Image (spheres, rainbow, N blue to C red):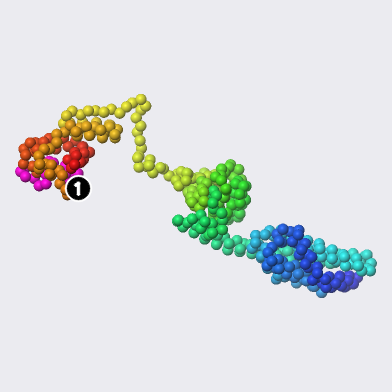
């Protein structure tokens, strides 16, 4: 009985094999109409037709010749089509769906062939059952092999593509003077909008599997598909692009991160075009540094470290230069002490308490009240053409004996005026500078 059913099944398979040149195009057309992932360009469609044809031929040979399922392997054309499916980032589910649809269609061909034969109903049912069992076993075995081929190729292709993308991104981040259009050509991305960068990482290498959730988490938080780049085995760089300046709600993202072990994410400030692409990434890196230095263990999300171009954990350079300030109590005013004539210490103390603008006015007023040196020698010495430093000019105005070099004078009145002037210059360096400037005019 079993041999007779096997013989009848072989005859059905032989008749179907003769019709395969017409049946194969009908099956591939069905795949294209039902499964959107099968709508490829001409080159990939030819590969899909070859895969379908090789699988149908293998099924027919198995039923006709009684080939054991243990000897069944994935046809080369079907294996290559699965690799191409992975390279095009098409889902494995769509590929497996095609095999199940093909199994159903093949059994319809069997039933149609048997309906045209004068055969007892019991034999027709037995033949149909045998062929269905063999085809189902073939599909299960081939799908198992195709799944391994697809996943292996997908991982290999992602590593290769991500290595290329990582190199391109690093070049854009490191190249100064790069225009937005040039960066777009290098990355194949639109950079003319706004960008928020993110840096995601795990602290333990055995938790790197959580990095696969980064794209989904950022997409849920932003409503945009992020660009992901593997910086290393435990770090992912990401960018979310927007047409306008975005406002990201980080609370839901922080809540979701608690579900993924040690996964952490640091965010940068929004930035526009290629400059914002860079600065937002730099701020995300600084936020990660802050997190790794002193963050709490329960914290998972680290929003931007500071404003554009300046991390929040660094003090302002201007304040660092000015040092600590000692504000005076409210309702008080600065006191100004007027020194007695000739009291240089009093002048210095009073000047330190004056505001800068009032100090300058006081110095100018005191300078105008001083006597000016008279005589041709003093004037000639003060206006010497090669005098370049005010301090030297002040030194020349000090009293000397006889005929001084450069600033000397033979006029006794001029010498007396210079002596008085020198005594008044001992107060502060600023007064000596002012007097030197006036003398050199």
Q: Is residue 412 left or right of residue 320?
A: left
Q: Residue furthest front?
A: 376
Residue 388 magenta-highlighted = yes
Q: Main secondary structure of the magenta part?
A: loop
Along the viewing direction, whichever of 329 and 403 lies nearer the viewer? 403
Residue drawn at (22%, 28%), measured in percent from left and top?
A: 338
Question: What residue is at 90 percent from the left and 65 percent from the top?
Answer: 115
Where residue 170 appears, as percent x and y from the top left, is: 50, 58
Q: Quadrant of the N terminus?
A: bottom right
Residue at (49, 48) in percent of width and height: 283
Can residue 78 be seen in this snapshot?
A: no
Residue denoted by label 1: 388
Residue 14 visible here: yes
Seen in the image, is 127 located left or right of residue 44? Answer: right
Q: In the depicted view, which residue is nearer to us: 416 or 10?
A: 416
Residues in magenta, as a range: 387-407
Q: Quadrant of the C terminus?
A: top left
Residue that sits furthest to the bottom in the current view: 65
Q: Is residue 64 above or below residue 403?
A: below
Up the image or down, 245 lies above or below 165; here it is above
Q: Nearer the viewer, residue 18 or 66?
A: 18
Is 19 situated left or right of 186 in this image? right
Residue 87 vs 273, above or below: the answer is below
Q: How many marks?
A: 1
Magenta span includes 277 = no
Quadrant housing residue 252: top right
| Image spot of residue 175 (x, y percent) | 46, 57
Q: Assign a secondary structure to mark 1.
A: loop
């Amino acid at each position: 009985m079993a041999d007779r059913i096997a013989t009848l099944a072989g005859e059905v398979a032989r008749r179907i094999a003769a019709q395969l040149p017409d049946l194969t195009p009908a099956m591939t057309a069905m795949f294209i109409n039902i499964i959107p992932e099968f709508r490829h360009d001409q080159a990939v469609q030819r590969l899909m037709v070859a895969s379908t044809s090789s699988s149908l031929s293998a099924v027919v040979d198995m039923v006709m010749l009684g080939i054991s399922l243990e000897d069944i392997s994935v046809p080369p054309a079907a294996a290559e089509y699965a690799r191409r499916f992975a390279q095009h980032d098409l889902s494995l589910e769509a590929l497996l769906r095609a095999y199940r649809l093909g199994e159903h269609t093949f059994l319809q061909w069997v039933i149609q062939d048997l309906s045209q034969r004068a055969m007892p109903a019991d034999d027709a049912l037995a033949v149909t059952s045998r062929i269905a069992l063999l085809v189902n076993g073939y599909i299960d075995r081939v799908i198992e092999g195709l799944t391994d081929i697809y996943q292996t190729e997908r991982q290999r292709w992602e590593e290769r593509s991500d290595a290329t993308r990582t190199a391109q991104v690093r070049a854009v981040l490191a190249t100064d003077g790069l225009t937005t259009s040039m960066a777009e050509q290098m990355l194949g991305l639109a950079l003319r909008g706004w960008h928020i960068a993110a840096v995601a990482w795990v602290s333990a290498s055995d938790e790197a599997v959580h990095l696969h959730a980064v794209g989904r988490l950022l997409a849920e938080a932003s409503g945009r598909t992020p660009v992901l780049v593997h910086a290393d085995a435990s770090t992912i760089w990401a960018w979310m692009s927007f047409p306008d300046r975005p406002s990201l709600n980080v609370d839901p993202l922080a809540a979701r991160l608690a579900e993924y072990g040690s996964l952490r994410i640091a965010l940068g400030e929004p930035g526009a075009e290629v400059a914002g692409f860079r600065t937002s990434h730099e701020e995300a890196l600084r936020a990660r540094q802050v997190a790794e230095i002193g963050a709490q263990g329960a914290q998972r999300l680290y929003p931007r470290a500071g404003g554009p171009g300046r991390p929040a954990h660094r003090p302002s350079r201007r304040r660092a230069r000015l040092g600590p300030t000692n504000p005076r109590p409210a309702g008080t005013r600065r006191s100004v002490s007027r020194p007695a004539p000739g009291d240089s210490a009093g002048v210095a103390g009073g000047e330190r308490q004056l505001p800068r603008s009032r100090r300058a006015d006081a110095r100018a007023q005191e300078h105008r009240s001083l006597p000016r040196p008279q005589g041709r020698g003093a004037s000639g010495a003060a206006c010497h053409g090669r005098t370049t430093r005010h301090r030297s000019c002040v030194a020349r105005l000090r009293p000397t004996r006889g005929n001084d070099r450069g600033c000397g004078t033979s006029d006794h009145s001029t010498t007396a005026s210079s002596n008085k002037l020198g005594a008044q210059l001992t107060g502060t360096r600023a007064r000596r500078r002012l007097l030197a400037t006036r003398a050199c005019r």
